[in-house]
Image (cartoon, rainbow, N blue to C red):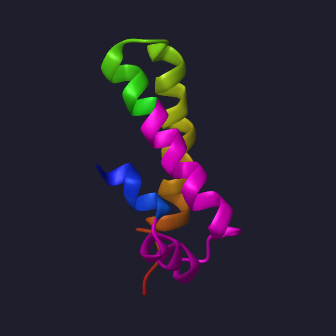
Amino acid sequence: MKSFDHFSGKMIDYAVKSGVPFPGFAVPVAGILALVGGLSILFGYRAKIGAWFLVIFLLPITFAMHKFWASD
């Protein structure tokens, strides 16, 4: 499961290299949001709240980690 990768040092190191503020806190919180949101939708328990968790997870991740508009 990919959300469990958010609790590894490798993912935190990648966030540090990408310039994410407070990566030791932000990366595990992102993993929790992804895991809880995905399980909520999968099991149909409070799926709308789970969907919002995924939105809250995906919007900052897109802009912080996937800077497709910047040239390297």
Residue situated in front as seen by the camera: 57 or 36? 36
- Please provide percent x and percent y for residue 67: 47, 68
Question: Residue placed at 48% from the left, 75% from the top?
Answer: 9
Question: Residue placed at 34% from the left, 16% from the top?
Answer: 43
In the rendered structure, the answer to whether residue 3 lies left or right of residue 50 reads left
**Vertical placement of 25 versus 34: above or below?**
below
Which residue is farthest top? 45
- Is residue 38 within the magenta segment? no
- Please provide percent x and percent y for residue 31: 49, 50
**Vertical placement of 35 versus 21: above or below?**
above
- Please provide percent x and percent y for residue 24: 64, 68
**Vertical placement of 14 versus 57: above or below?**
below
- Is residue 21 within the magenta segment? yes
**Vertical placement of 72 versus 8: above or below?**
below
Q: Quadrant of the C terminus?
A: bottom left
In the rendered structure, the answer to whether residue 30 lies left or right of residue 24 reads left
Residue situated in front as seen by the camera: 61 or 38? 38
Question: Residue placed at 48% from the left, 55% from the top?
Answer: 62
Q: Which residues are magenta?
A: 8-36
Q: Quadrant of residue 64?
A: bottom right
Q: Main secondary structure of the magenta part?
A: helix
